[in-house]
Amino acid sequence: MAQFELVMPKMGESIMEATILKWVKKVGDSVDIDETILEIATDKVDSEVPSPAKGVITQILFPEDTTVEIGKVIAIIASEGAGESKVAPVSEAPAQPTVKSEPTPISTISSGSTTTETIPTTAGGKFYSPLVKNIAEKESVTINELDSIAGTGANGRVTKKDILSFVESKANGQSAMVVEQKIAPITETSVTATPAPKPAQSYGGNVEIIEMDRMRKLIADHMVMSKQTSPHVTSYVEIDVTDIVKWRDKVKDKFEKKYGEKITYTPIFVQAVARAIADFPMINISVDGTNLIRKKDINIGMAAALPSGNLIVPVIKNADMLNLVGLTKSVNDLANRARANQLKPDEIQNGTFTLTNVGTFGNVMGTPIINQPQVAIMAVGAIRKKPAVVETPYGDMIAIRQLMFLSLSYDHRVVDGSLGGSFLRRVGDYLEKFDVNQEI
């Protein structure tokens, strides 16, 4: 009987871990190839993980609400048939370590650790997932308070929902649920080492308190990390896209009838960006310590708004290899499936440059935050009619033109003003010189 190791899939170049939201299948359940086994989440996307083989689930190595490193084995599937397993043998789960007689303060648990092995943290031998321990540390929940929470998970395990309910009750001055167990006596030393509870926040006036959803919390962390990692600089250009607007108005009905797709401005912007990246390849890099990693593939991410108000960035792979029809099909397909939460993990990773359209919301320009580990992101603003000076054979004239702003935020550690400004200007040049006579 062959065994298959189901590992936590890589969900993006900058994603190192994912959280198990729900096990759709349990130990002993039969699964077919590509049948959904569990649901996972990162700061970018919620996704279903399919089975790599047909068989029976014999082990589930991590419970729900656990944050697991990319590449770690999370389940074992036994498949009928002779022959040796095609995967490496799975090591046995570690035996439960001996519990120390002294409680371990939560402050000694590294919040940056990505280990997913459960570690005893109390004299009672209770175990907590990394997610629960991180929340406890951030919310200044003492080890004795953590021990007192009545877990609703398997074998009384404290889940994310349990600890968040405890924190909310504590903030409201209510008594928390406790389990009937003997808590180790608090010594003078442990009292000194335990951080003081954070005082409840007081809000004045007529307010409504809305907790961030999980995806928004992760996005917030990712944005803060990007600003802390890269010194952001933003350059701007204003361009004339009158010819593009007229061309699209002329061909959009014929284009949809011929290809079954509505053509928007986005594939035209993507095409110009891909051409400019080919001219300035050092904008298509990432940073690894003191090394620059130049990406030979041009994979352009496009920020898409979700119905929840959050954003996701599906990636158009090898955008420089696609014509306008191919780009239109890719843009429409990815945008539609992003809104329906049907993107595959591979479709949101390995981006090398990101494009965001703030003009969708009526904004004329923006200063976007870099999508790490990339080094640049471009925003396109709203197209507006404005009076502009136009050069003609008869001299300069003032005419009504369709103008828009482009803005480029870039990592000033490795992209200086000359490169960033020249790249942005080249994108503008490609758009202003758009071939209005091209056939569809």
Image (cartoon, grey):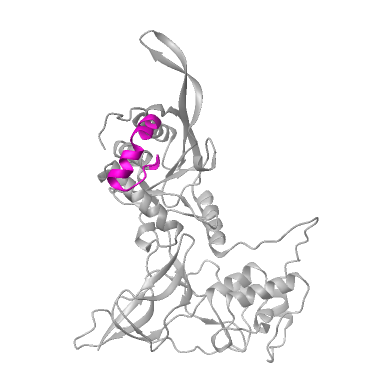
- Residue 49 can be seen, yes or no: yes
Locate residue 89, reporting x and y percent: 29, 83
Classify 183 as above or below 227.
Answer: below
Please tell me whether residue 249 belongs to the stretch shown in magenta: yes
Which quadrant of the figure has residue 361? top right
Identified at 41% across, 35% down, the residue is 420
Classify 403 as above or below 26.
Answer: above
Horizontal placement of 230 versus 259: left or right?
right
* Of 104 and 200, the residue lying toward us: 200
Locate residue 294, reporting x and y percent: 32, 47
Identified at 50% across, 27% down, the residue is 385
Q: Tell me how many marks there are.
A: 0
Which quadrant of the figure has residue 416? top left
Q: Quadrant of the C terminus?
A: top left
Classify 15 as above or below 365.
Answer: below
Q: Quadrant of the N terminus?
A: bottom left
Q: Please state the extent of the stretch shown in magenta in the rendering.
A: 244-266
Locate residue 372, reporting x and y percent: 44, 52
Horizontal placement of 252 versus 156: left or right?
left
The prevailing secondary structure element of the residues shown in magenta is helix
- Residue 411 can be seen, yes or no: no
Residue at the limit of the structure toward the top, as seen here: 394
* Of 418 and 324, the residue lying toward us: 324
Please tell me whether residue 153 belongs to the stretch shown in magenta: no
Horizontal placement of 287 versus 121: left or right?
left
Locate residue 21, reporting x and y percent: 49, 73
Residue at the limit of the structure toward the left, as seen here: 83
